[in-house]
Image (tube, rainbow, N blue to C red):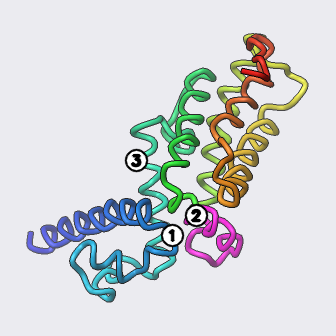
Amino acid sequence: MARRGAYAKGVAKREEILERALEVIAREGYRGASVKELADAVGLSQAGLLHYFDSKEELFTEILRKRDEVDARQFGDPASPDTVVDSETLQEGFVGIVRHNAEVPGLVQLFSRMAVDAADPQHPAHRYFLERGANLRSTFIAALSQRQAEGHLSDRVDPEMLARIFQAVADGLQLQWMQDPEIDMAAHVSALFDALDPDATPKDPQS
């Protein structure tokens, strides 16, 4: 019983660390969020903080997982394996996440930097990015296939290829936005949805 209680407390503390870390990184940015600052935020030493994670890299990987959980609750994150949506709901949720990302630049920086490092198969985030990408594309494929079957989307491009295009656009826009924060990421992603929808009302370029 004592061991079960200690385990439950450990899980709760780990969750507290991840939730506070999201706040710190969103506020201070990726560079400003050192292990020491994250440890201070939850009243632990650096060694005490890393007791709950195998390494700094695993800590940051789990922070990204926690971010996905939070986004899924708020927007229906298409990268979540439990998300099943139609194409309209997918567009609303995906654009909502992209718009929200502009409000938390530190988390965008963390995601982008970790994505590069995770190209190494030995990196703790490698599996996370592979699984996240697969879940995202699976959700998009289902929704886009539905749109094609209903005649609301051209079938000249395979849904799987379109899903990868959406993923590439979102990831690429984040890199551009970090260099030029004036870029409206959400507007560009929304424009891509509209460009693929023959039923969409053309927008006045002067509006």
Q: Verify whether residue 70 appears in magenta.
A: no
Asked which quadrant contains residue 23, the reply is bottom left
Is the residue 166 above or below the residue 48 in the image?
above
> Which circle, 1 or 3, is nearer the viewer?
1
Q: Secondary structure at mark 3?
A: helix
Residue 145 horizontal/vertical position (percent): 73, 24
The residue carrying mark 1 is 30
> Which circle, 2 or 3, is nearer the viewer?
2
Is the residue 167 above or below the residue 39 in the image?
above
In the image shown, does 39 or 55 lie closer to the viewer?
A: 39
User: Which label number is shown at residue 100?
Assistant: none
Is the residue 94 above or below the residue 104 in the image?
above
Q: Residues within 10 Å of mark 2 (few under 14, many from 20)?
A: some
Range of the magenta residues? 109-127
Callout 2, which amino acid? Gln
Is the residue 86 above or below the residue 150 in the image?
below
Q: Residues within 10 Å of mark 3 (few under 14, many from 20)?
A: some
Q: Are marks 2 and 3 in contact (CB under 8 Å)?
A: no
Q: Measuring 70% from the left and 33% from the top, which residue is drawn there?
A: 141
Callout 3, which amino acid? Val
Residue 111 horizontal/vertical position (percent): 58, 62
Q: Are marks 2 and 1 in contact (CB under 8 Å)?
A: yes
The residue carrying mark 2 is 109
Residue 174 horizontal/vertical position (percent): 66, 53
Q: Secondary structure at mark 1?
A: loop
The residue carrying mark 3 is 70
Give the farthest residue toward the left. Answer: 1
Separation (CA) of disc 2 from disc 3: 17 Å
In the rendered picture of this protein, how many numbered marks are placed on residues?
3
**Is residue 19 shown left or right of residue 116?**
left
Residue 96 horizontal/vertical position (percent): 53, 35
- Identify the mark nearer the N-term, 1 or 3: 1
